[in-house]
Image (cartoon, rainbow, N blue to C red):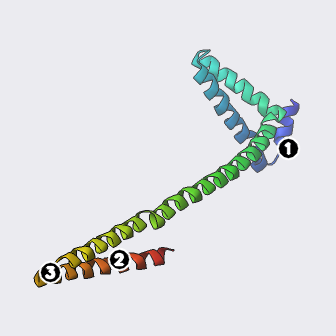
Amino acid sequence: MALFEDLLTVPPKELIYTVFIPFIIAFAIFWGILSALKIFDKKVNLILAFAIAFAATYYGAFGIVSTYLLNLSANLAVTAFVIIFILGIVIWSIFTLQDVFGPTDKKLMKTREKIEKLYSKLDRTHDPAKQRAIEKQIRKEEIKERLQESRDRRHR
């Protein structure tokens, strides 16, 4: 009877947080474990979960376990955040640097090679109409080259 006398002296708010909620949580955990294991019938699982939750609540084992799990989960959450944050930065920087230094430099080199080929073609051509057409292509390619260089400067 000492248990019920002790419960009557505890304020209702504290009773909810120190007895009722830990009991419900412990009951749900143990009933879920017993149901997943499928060792007993549903009624036996219910009675066992009730008895284990009642014992855990009465002896304060749930308070100790919940305090330990609270600290553990907080540490795991911070550790997971740090790992994900660092991995995110590394992955983001790899893709960003690849975009800045990789494809744009290759495009710029291809444009310069095309300009060089057009200049050599211009030197070999003696027809004024073809020379004007090649000069027009060279101007277009040089404009592309300048645009690519200015984009590269902005990204770096």
Residue occupying the point 69% across, 53% down: 78
- Report the residue marked by disc 3: 126
Instruction: Kindly indicate whether the residue at mark 2 contacts the one at mark 1 (C-beta within 8 angstroms).
Output: no
Residue 109 is tagged as none
Image quadrant of residue 151?
bottom left
Q: Position of residue 46 (x, y in %)?
A: 63, 23
| Circles 2, 3 touching at the beta carbon (< 8 Å) | no
**Can you give x and y, in whole percent of width and height, for residue 12 in the image?**
76, 47
In this view, the mark in front (2 or 3)? 3
Give the labeled residue for mark 2: 145
Q: Amino acid at mark 2?
A: Glu
Q: For mark 1, what is the residue?
A: 9
Within 10 Å of the Cα at label 2, are there few (<14), some (14-19), or many (20+) other Cα atoms? Answer: some
Name the residue located 66 percent from the left edge and 54 percent from the top edge.
82
Secondary element at tag 1: helix
Task: Identify whether 99 is placed above or below 7.
Answer: below
- At 33% across and 69% down in the image, what residue appears? 113
Q: Is residue 139 above or below residue 40?
A: below
The answer to whether marks 1 and 3 mark residues whose Cβ atoms lie closer than 8 Å is no
Q: Earlier in the sequence, mark 1 or mark 3?
A: 1
Name which quarter of the figure residue 20 lies in.
Answer: top right
Q: Quadrant of residue 112?
A: bottom left
Foreground mark, 1 or 2, reads 2
